[in-house]
Amino acid sequence: MKALVTVLVIILAIVAAIFLFDFNVTKEGELPEVNVTGGEMPDVDVETPDVDVQTERKTIEVPSDIDVDLPDDRPDVDADVDMDVDAEVNSKEDGNSTAQ
């Protein structure tokens, strides 16, 4: 399973590299002489996408006492659940958010 995920990640990275960059060869290269005395590298202009990465730390108050009205026809369940959750929420200006 890990090998499959690794292969998929590698394929995704290759596909992303192919489609995110625009390579324009401005000068053709040439192979070196057989006696390996040199050669000439091609001139290549690479246009990469603009990436603007920003972070912002915010503290969000989470209510601790929430009342929930459950329907009367629910089955009887005898269970006690006690859970502590530590969460950090990072949000961006464009409305996307991630939770850790």
Image (spheres, helix red, strand yellow):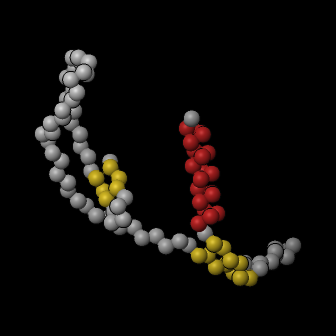
Residue 40 in view in this figure: no
x 60%, y 40%: residue:
4
Q: Return the residue nearer the eye: 88 or 34.
A: 88
- Which quarter of the rendering shows the N terminus? top right
Q: Return the residue nearer the eye: 37 or 78.
A: 78
Which residue ends up furthest to the left in the rendered image?
A: 65
Q: Position of residue 44 (x, y in %)?
A: 67, 78
- Left or right side of 91 for 39: right
x 35%, y 53%: residue:
98
x 60%, y 46%: residue:
8
- Left or right side of 70 for 43: right
Residue 16 in view in this figure: yes
Q: Position of residue 63 (x, y in %)?
A: 15, 45
x 16%, y 51%: residue:
61
- Left or right side of 18 for 41: right
Q: Position of residue 76 (x, y in %)?
A: 23, 17
Q: Position of residue 38 (x, y in %)?
A: 78, 78
In the image, residue 23 above or below residue 86: below
Which residue ends up furthest to the bottom in the rendered image?
A: 27
Say which quarter of the image contains residue 71. Answer: top left
In the image, residue 49 above or below residue 84: below
